[in-house]
Image (tube, helix red, strand yellow):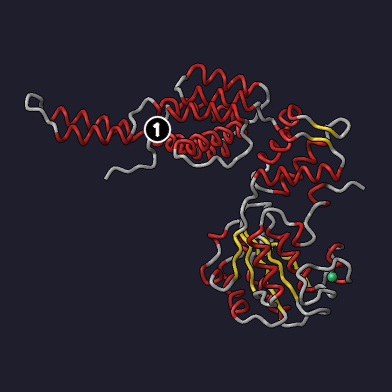
Amino acid sequence: MYTPLANKYRPQKFADVVGQDVAVKILTKAILKDRVGHSILFTGTRGVGKTTLARILAKTLRCENRQPNEYEPCGKCESCLNFSKDSQIDVIEIDAASNTGVDDVREIIESCRYKPTTGKYKIFIIDEVHMLSKSAFNALLKTLEEPPEHVKFLMATTEIFKIPETILSRVLRFDLKNVDSVLISQYLSTVCNRENISVGAEALSLVARFANGSIRDSLSILDQILNVADNNSLSAEQVREILCVSDDSDLLELFSLIMSSNLKDSVEKYREIISNEVAAKAVLTRLMDFVYFVTCVKTNLKITDKTLPEESENELRKIAQNTSLSSLSRIWQMLVKGADELKICDRQEIALEMLIIRIIYASHLPDLDEFLKKLTADSFSVSEDRDINSQTSESTSLLAEAMKSFPNAKLK
Ligand SMILES: [Zn+2]
């Protein structure tokens, strides 16, 4: 039977976890010292391994063969095997998204009173814990304060800011980070070797980039594109086609045109890219990458993303020479806002075209830094033969114009 790669390669022990070194180090040390907290909260974006880590921890704590000087589950005892079969009685997984109420939590608390049927610990894994209602959190609080010795709460959330302070102060918190795309592409390459699939480095780095820091997503994407691969091999060209991403050189050309404020050519280039079935979101993401790269160059920071070919890097360095930091941050802001707009728009390709036009229009407006300098200089050099009122109204209209390009700025 076919098993999706994301399931097949789901980490079964701490050593399998990719890209969460800090969390793994702290947890394994705590296991060795027998000092694992009663309530642990994993936070991070989707697919970074929150529930995976919670499950490995639960498995380790319940493993029957584990010696005090070991921190991995054996994978062979009854408890470990039950884990693989998803038939653990003493590990209770709750999806808070569908069990949000106070009664659901009362049920959990009630069952806390009873010792595990086997082993040392009864473990509750509560996923999407931020979905619990206020009264449910309150009900849980008391138990978190004084949990029975035999109980562990392992919680996961994508939205840490929705968790009440009172809860946060009683849990050990792990902030899982998005996995670096270079690390993802290295990982995918080992998976491909094991699976006897031939995929080049460029194709893998495209998949890694598309996975947005999630190993799980990267495997699902790989699965998806392998469905259309012939003879278990994939070229970068095929990956681009399937993922609806454009050739990087096309996108770089578009970026360069936008940065030189060339409205007509920018829109034409954009339409050409979109006409090849490229998703607007992919274009937007890449434009954001480019703004980030140029900002790094501008501020003498190292470019950490290795997905950029050398010739592209040279091109971006040239763009950096002709762009100010303030316009880069302005464009970044507009792109971030645009990403939100794209989500609510049915016709994303039009939304992005409008955004490109807006960015170029804004680039013709005075730069705020320059403008403020000019404004200060003006106020100090009011010439006697000029009417001060006309000068002020000129400045005010200039200011009003400039403010349009800073949607978040407020006039005091
Ligand atoms: Zn075991």
- Which residue sits at x=66%, y=43%? 182
Going by the image, does 4 lie left or right of 54? right
Q: Position of residue 127 (x, y in %)?
A: 68, 62
- Which residue sits at x=82%, y=72%? 63
Q: Quadrant of residue 193?
A: top right
Q: Label 1's element?
A: loop
Q: Position of residue 382 (x, y in %)?
A: 12, 31
Amino acid type, mark 1: Ser
- Which residue sits at x=54%, y=61%? 162
Going by the image, does 374 lie left or right of 307? left
Going by the image, does 319 lie left or right of 116? left
- The residue nearer to you, when weighing 25 against 353, is 25
Report the number of numbered marks. Answer: 1
- Quarter of the picture containing the C terminus is top left
Q: Quadrant of residue 152?
A: bottom right
Label 1: which residue? 324
Up the image or down, 331 lies above or below 77; here it is above
Q: Position of residue 38 (x, y in %)?
A: 65, 75
- The residue nearer to you, when weighing 5 against 353, is 5
Going by the image, does 332 lie left or right of 33? left
Up the image or down, 209 lies above or below 382; here it is below
Up the image or down, 86 lies above or below 278; here it is below
Q: Which quadrant does ligand 1 occupy?
A: bottom right
